[in-house]
Amino acid sequence: MKVLLKADVKGTGKAGDVVEVADGYGRNFLIKKGLAAVATASNVNEAQQKKEAAAFHKAEEVKATKALAASLDGKSVLVKIKVGENGKVFGSVTSVHVADALATMGFDIDKKKIKMEPVKSVGSASAEVRFMENVTAKITVVVEGL
């Protein structure tokens, strides 16, 4: 019996796959629990169109993310923080401070995507923004005292 999986089933397949299963397993378990439907031509076509649409949207998202990374790459971010004598920073400049500074520049970046060592002195340091696998941007963090 051929069924179209509606959800991932361990050992059988992933959602949207058309798989051949035993009649009893298909009728009594997969279809009864709502994990699959009988594979008709219209069901298979609909699943194929959904897969193609999902792939297209994923490609568009990757393209937009790469454009954002290209626009951010090489930028310099100014972070102002309270300092004491000798240019020693109270605390340290972290990815939270950099994310806030990027937000004022118009880039909405999550702090978890910014990889950097905490900066404990006035000056400049480098940071890396990892948007997704193989899409990164290198920025310079400039720390100034108030």
Image (cartoon, rainbow, N blue to C red):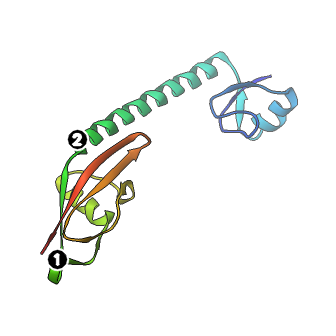
Q: x and y percent of residue 120 in the render? A: 27, 72
Q: Amino acid at mark 2?
A: Ser
Res. 22 mark: none
Q: x and y percent of residue 103 in the render? A: 23, 57
The residue pinned by badge 1 equals 87
Residue 90 occupies quadrant: bottom left
Task: Relative to 120, say whether 64 is above or below.
Answer: above
Q: Amino acid at mark 1?
A: Gly
Q: Residue furthest right?
A: 24
In the rendered image, the quadrant that contains the N terminus is top right
Res. 71 mark: 2
The residue sitting at 29% across, 73% down in the picture is 92
Q: x and y percent of residue 137 in the render? A: 30, 45
CA gap, disc 2 and disc 1: 32 Å
* Front residue (pair 18, 60): 60
Q: Please give left or right for residue 65 compared with residue 141 in the image.
A: right
The residue sitting at 17% across, 83% down in the picture is 84
The residue sitting at 68% across, 19% down in the picture is 40
* Secondary structure beneath label 2: helix
**Viewer can see residue 82:** no
Tell me which label, 2 or 1, sits earlier in the chain: 2
Task: Relative to 65, say whether 106 is above or below.
Answer: below
In the rendered image, the quadrant that contains the C terminus is bottom left
